[in-house]
Image (tube, rainbow, N blue to C red):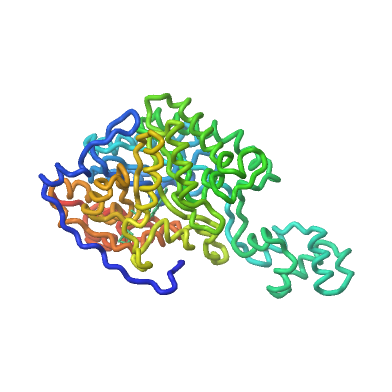
Amino acid sequence: MWKFANPIKHPIPEARWPTAEEATRSSLFQPVRVGSLELDNRTWVPAMVPWRATEDGFVTPDNLDWYRRFAAGQPAALVVEATGIRDIPSGPLLRISHDRFLPGLRKLVETVREASQGHTKLFIQIIDFLAVKRRPEAQKYFQRFLEITEHHRQAIAELTEDSKWLSADAAGIRAFLGEAADEIIAGVLNERELESLRFGYRERVTDLHLPHVRELPQVLPAIFAAAAHRAREVGFDGVELHYAHAYTMAGFLSALNDRGDGYGGPRENRVRLPLEVYRAVRQAVGDNYVVGARFLADEVIAGGNRLDTAAYFGVEFAKAGLDYLSISKGGKFEDAEQPKIGQAVYPYTGQSGYECMPTTLSDERGPFGRSVPLVAKIKHAVNAAGLTTPIVATGGITTFAQAEAILQHGDADIVGLARQALADPDWFIKVKLGRGHEIRRCTYTNYCEALDQAHRQVTCKLWDRKELDEAGIAMAADGRRRLLPPKWPR
Ligand SMILES: Cc1cc2nc3c(=O)[nH]c(=O)nc-3n(C[C@H](O)[C@H](O)[C@H](O)COP(=O)(O)O)c2cc1C
Ligand code: SF4
């Protein structure tokens, strides 16, 4: 996990919680219009993958329990985890890529509606991602995956000053590399091959030599549109297009996207596919349905987009008609740590990952509301263009006072609480009822994120070992953790 050179340990901000009357009068508990619907108030739980779907992407009873538990806290909006839109094996991540997934998703919608007593609007985040393989053992990589080319023969011949390698067969080259020292390997493999060896093979949107990557602009609008149509069919209140972090659509927006086919290079070209996807989705779901997007205020990688470009994208999205913009930061593969052999690279291990889910070991700015100044700039750019598209700020928001200040300063229209909601899904109802002092406060040390990285069922360290003798509770696959926080005895 990436760390600051001289980190400062920040305490959790002290909180003064409002009385029920103060909460009722607060900006946080005023309704807000999002496209064709109205949210009860300005609270929001952004998408969080809990690793509870079946291996082939179906909703499980554990998924239902998870969302039921969040809904019981009555946030005004809850975004269902990143859900795959392609009908391909993708492990225990939810999928909405075929009608066979719809009965489970319909049940999820009904569960949230019932548990929140109709107070929580339910959106679903829809995602496309490219192939990422696990880091291979070096021998396996040289024997099975590396495609031997003339370049390898020439490089070995030069490095060894022995021309016999120019005519060596592939088996000989593989055997040589299998025995070679790291510096020799670094001199023989090209940058992408070295990356595949050290981090695992990973596709990029710029891999135009791969037909399925070249064709992404032709195929993705229809795939996103079909997924959004299914979401509407089963009763979700809206869809969120996942244009953030390390995935396909963020790859198109990225400043590193230099595709030469009109979908890369200048920012006008990079935003083209995200806009085309949006238009196809809009056509599929009609005007009377919420379509939002999540994208990055800053990629936080060398050569990546910074705030000015993000503000440009925000204005383009708002102009196109997106109903809300949820702002995140970082979460990229480019600066991720090297994974262990047999594991896949995880896009939240580098500095960009830190910025996505900041912890209390920080610089002087600290993790709390760390992205708010960036969100505010995007909001001001959107408003300056004459648009009022609501903007969701997330990242280290944990107290009522923080949330209230963000809204009152006009830095955002809605506040998202991810980890704080995981630590205590009843945050929203407790604040509303004037019982904020009963909130279990997130410590922002990312035990939950480590579980996500290991693809283990996500829980919170503040409650997953508590009251394990409670009758009928569901336990994690490791048998040691409860999967949900205890009920709040109101
Ligand atoms: C376990 C876990 C899973 C997450 N999964 C997603 C996801 O599916 N999609 C997404 O856009 N962000 C995801 N995030 C990022 C959060 O939505 C949020 O942006 C981030 O945690 C920062 O907000 P916070 O400080 O309120 O936690 C995830 C975060 C966590 C901790
Ligand atoms: S595990 Fe830690 S960072 Fe995650 S929600 Fe719980 S207290 Fe917060």
Q: Of 440 and 142, which appears nearest the observer?
A: 440
Instruction: Name the quadrant of the N terminus.
Output: bottom left
Q: Position of residue 98 (x, y in %)?
A: 49, 33
- Can residue 223 be seen here? The reply is yes
Q: Is residue 86 above or below residue 437?
A: above
Residue lying at the far front in this picture: please name it: 384
Picture residue at 77% right of the left edge, 70% below the top: 176
Picture residue at 22% right of the left edge, 58% below the top: 440
Picture residue at 36% right of the left edge, 68% below the top: 361
Q: Is residue 458 above or below residue 235?
A: below
- Can residue 475 be seen here? The reply is no
In the drawing, does residue 221 fall left or right of residue 423?
Answer: right
Q: Position of residue 330 (x, y in %)?
A: 46, 55
Figure quadrant of residue 391: top left
Q: Of 468 and 419, which appears nearest the observer?
A: 419
In the drawing, does residue 230 fall left or right of residue 401?
Answer: right
In the drawing, does residue 174 fall left or right of residue 210?
Answer: right
Q: Is residue 212 above or below residue 287?
A: below
Picture residue at 26% right of the left edge, 46% below the top: 407
Q: Of 53 and 277, which appears nearest the observer?
A: 277
Q: Position of residue 27 (x, y in %)?
A: 21, 43
In the drawing, does residue 283 fall left or right of residue 479?
Answer: right
Q: Position of residue 8 (x, y in %)?
A: 35, 71
**How many callouts does the rendering have?**
0
Q: Of 126 and 95, which appears nearest the observer?
A: 126
